[in-house]
Image (cartoon, rainbow, N blue to C red):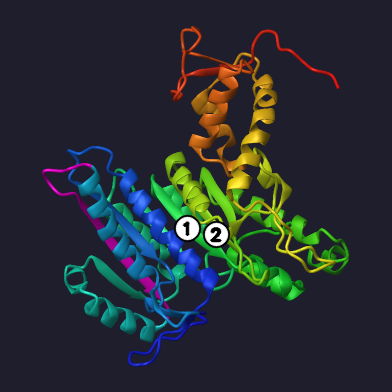
Amino acid sequence: MSHYTWNWGSSPPLLKRHSEVKHALLRNYLVNYFLTLVPLPQQDKIQLTIVDGFCGGGLYVNEDGLEVPGSPLIILEAIREAEVSVNLRQNRRKPIRIDVELICIDSNKSSLDYLRRLLEQRNYGEALRDGKVQFVKGEFADHCAAAIQRCHNRSPRSGRALFVLDQYGYSDVPMHCLQDIFAKLKFAEVILTFYIDSLINYLNEKNLALFEQATGINSSMRASDIDEMKQSPRWRVHLQSSLYRNLTDKCSAQFYTPFFIRPERGHGDFWLLHLSQHWKARDVMATTHWQHHNHFSHYGDAGFHMFSTGYIGKIDDEHKLQAGFDFSDVAEAVSKEKMMTQIPALLFAGADGMSFEQFFLELINTTPATREMVESTLLELHQSGEIIVSDEAGDPSKARVNLKSNHILRLPSQRSFSFL
């Protein structure tokens, strides 16, 4: 159920700062996402469907008292911004057209009424009349199957679709919905928020059972063990790691980024999960997180395998935020330094070498690093002689600027070791 209320003629609801940052990330991601879909100047149209599963009324007032757009308006504005950017960058003779059908779902009739009037006021009346913006009253879970079918009908071969699922809590997006999205739509993506602290802070036997029944996500924790488990200082780590593994294992997405939205006051953490079937989409989202480093974090280590450490919102005994990984310039330098030491060990596991594509895809879900960051680190190791890059024929590569997907990475036949 929504924590917000929209009534035309009344002031829009308050949007807290961390939610405003979440909306800024959504806007930036969408613009970058649209730009990646138009690589060639001769392409004059891209088509996809966006489902806003918890759309609300589309307008808020931020903590500074200014009106700010909600997700439906952000999506429509991002389409216009991307069209302008593509046309300018590619110096097109024929303008690009981003053909998006936006399906807005909300359980509250007054929210949808407000959104309709807002879009008319903001010059989206033609999109409403042409059916490019659709309104559906009800719960997302009840209309998910129909939305998937509509996405498939519009793009039967590519199944290109984006589901923006900014739920108000943690139990409104059942696992079967995520599974159906990725099973039936080849190039689907999901941006899912999950109010993890709300679940953990009020965890008891009843809440746990209701959560697992509603979502199909298994915490791997018996209700009878809750009180005993809470005695451990790291119980949040164990629970969140278990929930995350269960969600990503079951949802059928190949690629994912699990980062936190971190409120300034240090409590009330959200997961912001991006789930997709293509590594490029995951890379765009990872890049966007780096652009918003002041408000996104991950409570893990730098480099590869950082997500195996689990997630916590605070140190339980002291009620302080753990420093975590904050996507700052310092974090980028630390991550590169860590990868410099990890990569040779990872390549040793595949003594015959592996392609750059194979190496990257095997590790993409375990690191905050983008493809560009991983490539830069590999090139530096190659140039210093720590690893060898060769082409498919086995000839040493002279790569200095970029790597090709089929370049082979391996260790030198003899490596020097220093002993302290």
Task: Residue under label 2, please give it.
Answer: 272
Mark 1: which secondary structure?
strand
Q: Are marks 2 and 1 in contact (CB under 8 Å)?
A: yes
Name the residue tied to disc 1.
191
Furthest-bottom residue in this view: 9
Quarter holding the C terminus?
top right
- The residues tagged by marks 2 and 1 sit, at their Cα atoms, a distance apart of 7 Å
Tag shown at residue 275: none
* Position in image of residue 5 (x %, y %): 45, 86
Residue 408 image point, x, y percent: 52, 17
Residue found 25% across the figure and 48% down from its top: 86
Query: Can residue 177 be seen from the camera position used here?
Result: no
Left of 45 or right of it: where is 315?
right
Amino acid residing under circle 1: Ile
Q: Residue 205: say if magenta.
A: no
In this view, 230 is above or below 362? below
Determine crowd level at label 1: few under 14, some 14-19, many 20+ residues with C-alpha closer than 10 A.
some
* Disc nearer the start of the sequence (2/1): 1
For this rendering, which residue is in front, 207 or 6?
Answer: 6
The image shows a total of numbered marks equal to 2
Judged left or right of residue 238, residue 26 is left
Q: What is the crowding at mark 2: few (fewer than 14 residues within 10 Å), some, or many (at least 20)?
A: many
Kindly identify the residue that appears in the image at 70 percent across and 56 percent down.
311
Give the magenta range: 90-107
- The reply to whether residue 62 is in sight is yes
The quadrant in which residue 247 appears is bottom right
Q: Is 204 above or below relative to 393?
A: below
